[in-house]
């Protein structure tokens, strides 16, 4: 199969780049399985060492003119506003807005995410575990927590993480957004690279994810699981699909959230790692996408109608917590 991707950013990404990492890992694994992969992308991308053919997009007026004629399928990670002359699959990682429609062959990244967009099809994101070396965590005091998201994005709810950790006199490590100063127990690192992220995930006892919107997936959640780290989250979006009693806690409000942080808990880090390897790997993700590729190439529509965001309020309007 010959599959084409289009992405304007530099790959592989140097900083965090959740969606960018998913695209890169997916392309690499498709090559590993014997498929031909083409990327119309940033001239600075360094993907050819991975067996991916790079067609440099030097800001041509219409990037479709760069598409080779023998492509079997195009896979985009955004909803296009242009017609395609080839079979097309679209992955949406974010939330739409009221009234927004998506391509008929759109897949989402969790069951809840699909339902929120009147869709039926989804593929969980998966990690390349070569980038997440695992070392069993030793049982220790429940004292270090991590916030790993855009610090200034209100729906990610940094404020409640700070408040809960201060209340319990626990350490909070903040990775994401601009670096800023706090007390000795509240440490901000700004936007971190993959190496620093791994260091922090190896240090902390739990990831805090009390989001106040319908989280489509939350790549940081499975990154924490890869290190055997449990997650304390809110009940919104995909979190009830991802977080189980073996891998963390779902908290329905701030009172429950701060109590979970204040009280020590023990989780089996080996069990968490085994779970994430079996369910959220790049191999599992790629196989599911290959099934969708075959359906689209056969001419099948993945959804009975164009998916659309079913909410009546903006998805970033804060939910109760």
Image: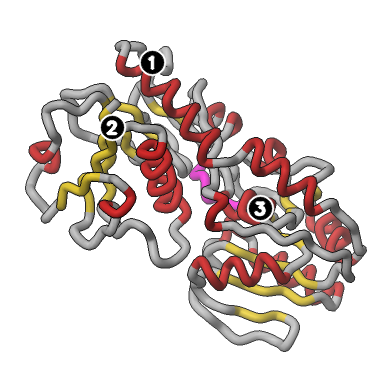
Element on which disc 2 rests: strand
User: At 90% across and 58% down in the image, what residue appears?
Assistant: 265
Q: Nearer the viewer, residue 225 or 60?
A: 225
Q: Earlier in the sequence, mark 1 or mark 2?
A: 2
* Highlighted range, magenta: 313-318
Q: Residues within 10 Å of mark 3 (few under 14, many from 20)?
A: many
Question: How far is the residue under mark 1 from the one under mark 2?
Answer: 14 Å
Q: State the residue in front, 78 or 308.
A: 78
Q: Which mark is residue 3?
A: 2
> Does 26 appear above or below 206?
above
Asked if residue 298 is among those painted magenta in the image, a careful observer would answer: no
Instruction: Report the residue marked by disc 3.
Output: 226
Please state, as top left, top right, bottom left or bottom right, where the N terminus lies in the image.
top left
User: How far apart are labels 3 and 2 at the CA level?
Assistant: 29 Å
Q: Secondary structure at mark 3?
A: helix
Q: Quadrant of residue 83?
A: top left
Left or right of 279: which side holds 122?
left
Tell which of 25 and 242 is nearer to you.
25
Mark 3 vs mark 1, CA separation in Å:
31 Å
Q: Is residue 81 visible?
A: yes
Secondary structure, mark 1, is helix
- Viewer can see residue 212: no
Picture quadrant where residue 141 is located:
bottom right
User: Which residue corresponds to the image point at 47% horizontal and 54% vertical from the top-left?
Assistant: 18
Residue denoted by label 1: 295
* Residue 100 rendering spot, x and y as whole percentages: 38, 34
Residue 35 rendering spot, x and y as whole percentages: 33, 32
Q: Label 2 neighbourhood size at 10 Å, few (<14), some (14-19), many (20+)?
A: many
């Amino acid at each position: 199969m010959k599959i084409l991707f289009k992405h304007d950013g530099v790959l592989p990404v140097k900083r965090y780049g959740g969606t960018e990492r998913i695209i890169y890992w997916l392309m690499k694994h498709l090559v590993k399985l014997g498929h031909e992969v083409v990327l119309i992308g940033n001239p600075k991308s360094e993907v050819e060492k991975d067996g991916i053919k790079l067609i440099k997009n030097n800001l041509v007026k219409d990037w479709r003119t760069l598409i080779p004629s023998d492509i079997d399928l195009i896979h985009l990670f955004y909803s296009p506003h242009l017609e395609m002359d080839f079979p097309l699959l679209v992955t949406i990682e974010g939330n739409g807005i009221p009234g927004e429609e998506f391509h008929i062959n759109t897949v989402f990244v969790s069951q809840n995410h699909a339902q929120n967009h009147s869709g039926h099809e989804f593929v969980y994101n998966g990690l390349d575990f070569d980038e997440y070396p695992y070392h069993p965590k030793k049982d220790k005091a429940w004292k270090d927590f991590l916030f790993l998201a855009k610090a200034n994005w209100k729906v990610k709810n940094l404020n409640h993480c700070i408040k809960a950790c201060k209340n319990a006199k626990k350490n909070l490590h903040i990775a994401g957004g601009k670096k800023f100063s706090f007390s000795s127990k509240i440490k901000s690192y700004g936007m971190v690279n993959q190496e620093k992220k791994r260091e922090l995930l190896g240090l902390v006892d739990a990831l805090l994810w009390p989001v106040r919107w319908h989280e489509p997936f939350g790549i940081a959640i499975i990154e924490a699981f890869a290190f055997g780290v449990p997650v304390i989250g809110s009940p919104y979006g995909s979190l009830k699909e991802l977080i189980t009693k073996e891998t963390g806690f779902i908290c329905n409000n701030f009172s429950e959230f701060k109590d979970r942080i204040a009280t020590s808990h023990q989780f089996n880090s080996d069990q968490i790692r085994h779970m994430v390897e079996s369910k959220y790997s790049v191999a599992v993700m790629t196989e599911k996408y290959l099934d969708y590729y075959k359906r689209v190439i056969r001419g099948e529509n993945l959804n009975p109608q164009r998916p659309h965001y079913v909410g009546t309020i903006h998805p970033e309007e804060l939910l109760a917590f």
